[in-house]
Image (cartoon, rainbow, N blue to C red):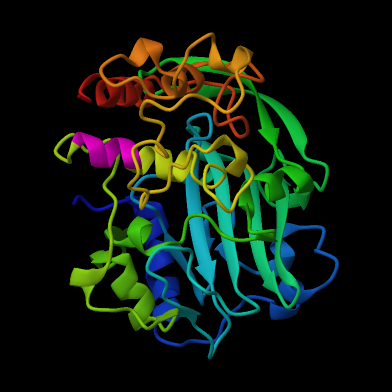
Amino acid sequence: MAARAPISLLKRALFAALLLGATTGAASAVDDQAILAAKPPRHLSDFGFFADAPRQVPAPGVLPFAPATPLFTDFAEKRRFVYVPEGESAAYKAHEAFDFPVGAALVKTFAYEAAGRPGGLRLVETRVLLHQKKGWQAWAYVWNEEQSDAELKIVGAKIPMTVPLPDGGTQEIVYAVPNKAQCKGCHELSGEIVPIGPKARNLNHAFDYDEGPENQLLRWASAGILVSLPDMTHVPAVPDWLDETAPLDARARAWLDINCAHCHRAEAAASNSGLFLTWDEKKPAALGIGKHPVAAGRGAGDLKVDIAPGDPDASILVYRVESTEPGVMMPELGRSLTDARAVALLREWVARMD
């Protein structure tokens, strides 16, 4: 599969030495006490995750990563990073997020292309997941206009902005930064907050590191971030949902897995729906095929089944992914726009079902 996340020339110059430190055991610049503090710091810079925050260049000990298929958030670009304290490692899990040690952090910046800004990006927010002794804590930091730092926003924020679209146009939106409770709404599994993205199937592909493309799981293992990685022939993998050379079913299932399955699974918030969209789900009815919704309402659009094989227009799943109406659209958080490419993919997937 093609390498991911190309790095600009300006970024490469700073990134080379920093990545070397991240993968050779050099001392970390990250403040471990800030990660473990009961009260989160006011500013993102207090953690020390970045050597050059406006350009999203990580500090030594912090490693960038990217899932094969990312979560959709109103066409935002995302820069993701993982930090594990020196001498600690995350333990491999075949199907769930890795078991990270206390003191680990996952960092995700949401940004849009913007000519003339550092790194060619307008940074909007950075979300952090911090693994403390009492469990994972989620916080959102909003970037200032100068792009010099981001400030903690426990109650979230609404940011009017113009976003670029894949077809070259733009769209006016009100970007929604989640509050503390909304973070929990997506990240809760079996009553606990957990990471969503860092799973084996999402990271089993090449990332464009400064030295060249390398499988992320192998890089994590060589850097000491991950232990117990099995033979790679036994590691699951999802495709890039935009890769038209990949099987249609795998592309659609990958998109549903990352965008919907954190809620639509037996252990999560939408368990009562009976619609389970994880990558590993095998039962057709659990995937919604021919399944009647548990509760009918305007969210169903007067349609009768979640997925009507061969008929996307009669499928509730397609109807809700296509909608932007509050109370109807799915996912219900993290977006105000519809990605027409995803809708087209799901419509084709349903249309080709027997």
Between residues 318 and 354, which one lies in front from this camera angle? 354
Residue 333 appears in which quarter of the rendering? top right
- Residue 18 in sight: yes
Q: Is residue 271 magenta?
A: no
- Residue at the outermost left position: 245
Residue 98 position in % (x across, y down): 48, 70
Q: Nearer the viewer, residue 203 or 291?
A: 291
Which quadrant holds the C terminus? Answer: top left
Residue drawn 40% across and 80% down? Answer: 23
Q: Is residue 135 above or below residue 288?
A: below
Q: With respect to residue 2, does 100 lie above or below?
A: below
80, above or below 25, in the image = above
Q: Is residue 195 left or right of residue 349?
A: right
How many numbered circles are shown? 0
Examine the rendering and report whether any part of residue 71 can be seen: no
- Mainly helix, strand or loop, the magenta region? helix
* Residue in the foreground of this view, choosing between 74 and 308: 308
Task: Please report the bounds of the magenta region as a residue range.
Answer: 248-253
Residue 59's x, y, as percent? 54, 70
The percent coordinates of residue 33 (x first, y second) are 75, 79
Name the outermost residue toward the bottom: 87
Foreground: 298 or 117? 298
Left or right placement of residue 26 versus residue 33 in this view: left
